[in-house]
Image (cartoon, rainbow, N blue to C red):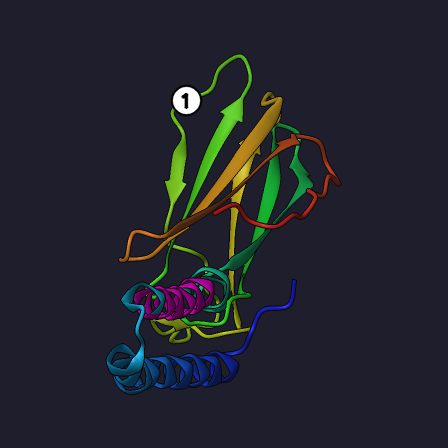
Amino acid sequence: MKHLSARSAVWLGYIVAILFTAEVVKLLIVHAEWLGSKKDPIQSITTIVSSGLVVLGALFAYFRFFHGRTFARRLDIQLDVKVIKTTPVAFLHAIDLDIKNIGSVPIWNPTVVLRIQQHGQSVGEPEEIDDWQDPFPIDRGSVIDTQESQQFYVWRRIPEETWAVTYWVKVSTSRGEAWTRAITIANTPDHTSSKAPAEG
């Protein structure tokens, strides 16, 4: 489903505000005159209540179907792991992570953490990585703007005796929002992990 742009959302907000104002004026002026001229007050009250319900329905529809979708924060996390044969006792796992903002609002102050869990006869505690390799240091900034992406890269040596490895990525913000992506790959050379959207 195609998301509305921020500019479209603003115009929709203006339209809703205009409709709301028009209904309020109608309630305060037109129906006020009706109350004085109508013989049956029940009919006038019914008309006022129905108009109010129309206004409330329009506001509910805007916040439920437009506002929520337009300003929803969405990330697409692509996690790719390649297994490369290096020495007889270990393999090199090259981990590429691409995070793209596919929503219509910026993602502020994202924190990216990668957890690595090995599977085999002798494995230790999961390892967490939050300091990514950056051969050409740049200022990433504190925001991922709409339709922009950030790339992260790191590598680890995994013993040949390990059967498989699970990689779990968590992207979170200071607002408490979080997106995750997890894959498990076999510890075999020339293996390339599959890619899929994030969860969140």
List x then y, in percent, for residue 109. Answer: 32, 65
Residue on which the image places disc 1: 124
Q: Say whether residue 41 is left or right of residue 53.
A: left
Quick check: can you spot residue 39?
yes
Most foreground residue, 98 or 46: 46
List x then y, in percent, for residue 49. Answer: 34, 64
Q: Residue 13 occupies which quadrant of the picture?
A: bottom left
Furthest residue toward front: 39
Q: Residue 159 occupies which quadrant of the picture?
A: top right
Most foreground residue, 87 or 167: 167
For the N terminus, the quadrant is bottom right
Residue 49: in magenta span: yes
Most foreground residue, 16 or 177: 16
Q: Residue 191 occupies which quadrant of the picture?
A: top right
Please, what secondary structure does the residue beneath circle 1 have?
loop
Furthest residue toward right: 190
What residue do we see at 28% from left, 85% from top?
A: 33
Whether 146 is drawn above or below 61: the answer is below
List x then y, in percent, for residue 107. Answer: 40, 66
Three-letter residue code for mark 1: Gly
What residue do we see at 42% from left, 75% from top?
A: 138
Q: Over which residues does the magenta segment extend?
A: 44-62
Q: Say whether residue 98 is left or right of residue 38.
A: right
Quick check: can you spot residue 159?
no
Number of numbered labels in the structure image: 1
